[in-house]
Each structure stands twice: as structure tokens, then as C-alpha cells.
Amino acid sequence: MKQFYTLIFCLLGFSIFAQQPYYDDVDLSLTGDALKFELSDKISIHNTSFTYGDNRDTIKTSDDEDFDDTDGNDTSSIIWLIYGHTDDSNCTTDRTRNENNFGGSSCEYNREHTFARGLANPTMGDASNGSTGILADPQNVRPSDQQMNNNKGNLLFTNGSGNAGNVGGLWYPGDEWKGDVARIIMYMYTRYGVQCLPEFVGTGPKQGTTEMLQLLIEWNIDDDVSPFEMQRNDYLESEYLNRNPFIDNPAFATVIWGGDNATDTWGVLLSTEEFQVNAIKMYPNPVKGEILNIKTQRDLQVDIFDVLGKKVIATTVNENSNAINVSALSNGLYLVKLKSSDGVVTKRLIKQ
């Protein structure tokens, strides 16, 4: 079911972007480490009183199998279990479980630190219900069958196929969960830096000259974001006050670490840029007055879209005439598509 809705989710990508003012103050024109550092600053703002124990209650909604995001209601008592794949007589491989079956006994679930506590450097330490900080971070904590969790332990992630399990003393998270794992590890590295280097929890070569593993880059592409992941992200923003950027837009990974293109949910991070973007200046941004200036040395078609995808301004600018009257625009976020004979680039605009 989780995989079934992925295509629908991708088709709704733009409307979902419209619901994410969280990134209004992030400079999406940045690349590489500059973007990583900006996202790190953004996601470091969180609910400092959130504890490891709070995850027990949060999981019941964030990981709910049937959470109704249209009215914010938790509509079932069943949750997804990471690494699980089959609901049958073998509890260890269950992909779902009653939310109240929490504990350390057979057919119960517990809290799995996807980036294993003991593999961080320095380690995260032992978790108690009152623990805060990195131990409590719900972006890293997922429900897992207690035996499956024990089987995984501190094994490093590796490639594989099919269902989750031990692969030659390493761990494959399963076809259904490898993208989730990749985006969690990317978040942990972006949030906590060298304490959570990807090489501490995964195997294989790095992506170019970066610290990101090629394995995780590939998983982020091969197993796209599901509505379930987005459900968690939305709910955790309300509880923990931050989001996982790589769930909101997997292409953040491409822009920061390189590799093949991941899905650009918003359609703005991987725009075709056959002409030099730096040669085009759009100012002021945010724009508080009536005039938006676009400094260019070529003829440009300028289309401005609101967050619902409606074109609200269509005009042209050139070296001698580069002022656009935006007084009719309401305050908010807009996308500005700049097109010349050499290519297309999309920039973000905030009207205040």
C-alpha cells in the first residue's frame, strides 16, 4: 500500500509544496555545502523539551497506517513497522502492528534508532524516557518489531533486494524501506554533522568528494517518497517543530552531494540552466514595494506563478527594460520562471 500511492504523491508534488511555508526563508539557489549548512541551521530549530519517551505517543499518530491528513484525525490503531514486510503468523516480519502492543516481548514493537545510537561518534549514549536532544529526535526514531530491531542491531546498511534482513553480516532494510532509511541518514548527517557521518552506518564508496555514500544516493532515487513519509513529516513539524528536507524534496540530495537526479518534488531545484544563472539578478527579494527588478543582458520571458500553479504575471524584460510591477500580488511565496533562447531557470520570490 505504501508504494501504491507514490505515483499519486508525485503528481501532487506542486500542491504539496504550496503547503510548505517552512522553507520560505531558505535560499533555494544555493548548492553543495552552502545549501547543506543553510538546511542544517533551519532544521536545528526544534522542540527542545521533546523527550525520547514522547516518541511512544507521537508514533501512534505519525506512523499510523490510516492517518487522515484531510482533517488531522488518527483513524486507526494500526502503525507501520520499519523493515517489516508481511503480516502473517511470523511476528518478526510484520509490517503493521496494533499501536498498543509496545514492549520488549514477542509480537511487540519498540523504538528503533535508524541511525544506530552506538554507531554515532561520539555515541548517542543510552536512551531513557527523559532523554532529549539527539536521542529523542523523532525524525530518527521509527517503530520496529522488537525481534526485527534486535536482528538489525548495529549492523551496517548494505545493498540487497527483496525484503529486509541480514546480508553477509550487514543489513538490507528492504525494497520498501531503503528510501526512508536513506532520507533519515541524510537528515541526521545534515542535522548533527560529523557525529553522524553516513560512513558510520553504511557501506560502499562515497559520492564524489563528499561524505555521502553512493548507496544512500541510489536508495533515495530508487525508492521515492511515499505519502506515509510525508504524513510523518507534517505531523512531526507540529510536535517537534522541524521537518526532514529530503522527504519534502529528494532533489536536495542531488543539489548538495551530486549523483543522478532524484525526484524534484517542487520542480525548481533541478531546473534546466543552460545559461549562466548568476548573470541574472532578481531584486529586491523579498519585495516589499511595487517594483521587482530583473537585471539581465538578454531578452527574457518572465512568468510568475502562485503556489497553486496559477500564472499571475506574464511579461518580458531585457537589458533596457527590467522593472516589473508586482503591486497586484498578495503577500506570499511565488515561483518566477525566466526563459531565454538559451534555457530556463526558476527562482523563488517572496512578496511582503
Image: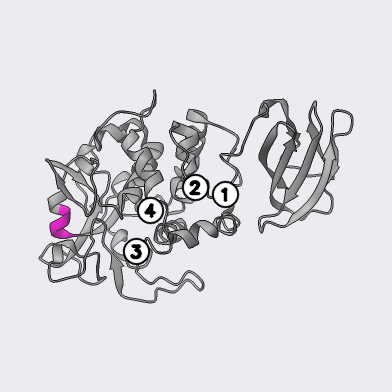
Between label 4 and label 2, give the one nearer the viewer: 2
Disc number placed over residue 49 in the picture, else none: 4
Measured Cα–Cα span from mark 3 to mark 4: 21 Å
Seen at 12% across and 58% down, the residue is: 147
User: Mark 1 sits on what residue?
Assistant: 266
Ranked by sequence position, the earlier of labels 4 and 1 is: 4
Seen at 25% across and 41% down, the residue is: 159
Residue interval drawn in magenta: 145-149
Q: Mark 2–mark 1 contact, CB under 8 Å?
A: yes
Measured Cα–Cα span from mark 4 to mark 2: 27 Å
Neighbours of disc 2 within 10 Å: few (<14), some (14-19), many (20+)? many
Measured Cα–Cα span from mark 4 to mark 1: 32 Å
Q: Secondary structure at mark 3?
A: loop
Q: Is residue 12 left or right of residue 44?
A: right
Ranked by sequence position, the earlier of labels 4 and 2 is: 4
User: Mark 2 sits on what residue?
Assistant: 249
Disc number placed over residue 63 in the picture, else none: 3
